Image (tube, helix red, strand yellow):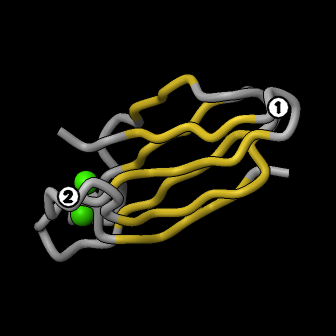
Amino acid sequence: MDLYFKTYLNNDQKPDVIVANYNDNNVSILLNNGIGGFFLQMTYAIGVYPFLLGVNDIDGDNKLDIITVNRSSNDIAVLRQC
Ligand SMILES: [Ca+2]
Ligand SMILES: [Ca+2]
């Protein structure tokens, strides 16, 4: 089951979408383009079978980071925004 998270990843006040793709073992980030759609998605590899998805600023740099907990690889992936 894919997981979806709606949040404000950048500072443009337009909601963005993060998807953890369970069977593809990656995370897709869709930034709102402000005209009813999204910019080209960015995809990042993570662990195997992500089953939890969260967003928080875990390193305190005032930029949201993406965290997944991965079932089969028994690990946590952190995607830090730079
Ligand atoms: Ca945005
Ligand atoms: Ca951060």
Q: CA distance from mark 2 to mark 1?
A: 28 Å
Of the two numbered discs 2 and 1 in the rendering, the one whose residue sits closer to the viewer:
2
Q: Residue at x 35, y 35 (%)?
A: 40
Q: Residue type at mark 2?
A: Lys
Q: In screen coordinates, is 20 left or right of 27? A: right
Task: Write down the quadrant of residue 59 in the picture.
Answer: bottom left
- Closer to the camera, 17 or 61? 61
Q: Which residue is mark 1?
A: 23
Task: Write down the quadrant of residue 55 in the picture.
Answer: bottom left
Q: Is residue 65 above or below residue 60?
A: above
Q: Quadrant of ligand 1?
A: bottom left
* Element marked by disc 2: loop
Q: Residues within 10 Å of mark 1 (few under 14, many from 20)?
A: few
Q: Residues within 10 Å of mark 2 (few under 14, many from 20)?
A: some
Residue at the extreme bottom:
13
> Is the C-beta of the residue carrying label 2 under 8 Å from the nearest atom of ligand 2?
yes
Q: In screen coordinates, is 13 left or right of 78? A: left
Task: Write down the quadrant of residue 41 in the picture.
Answer: top left
Q: Is residue 38 above or below residue 73?
A: below
Q: CB of mark 2 within 8 Å of CB of mark 1? A: no
Q: Which residue is mark 2?
A: 63
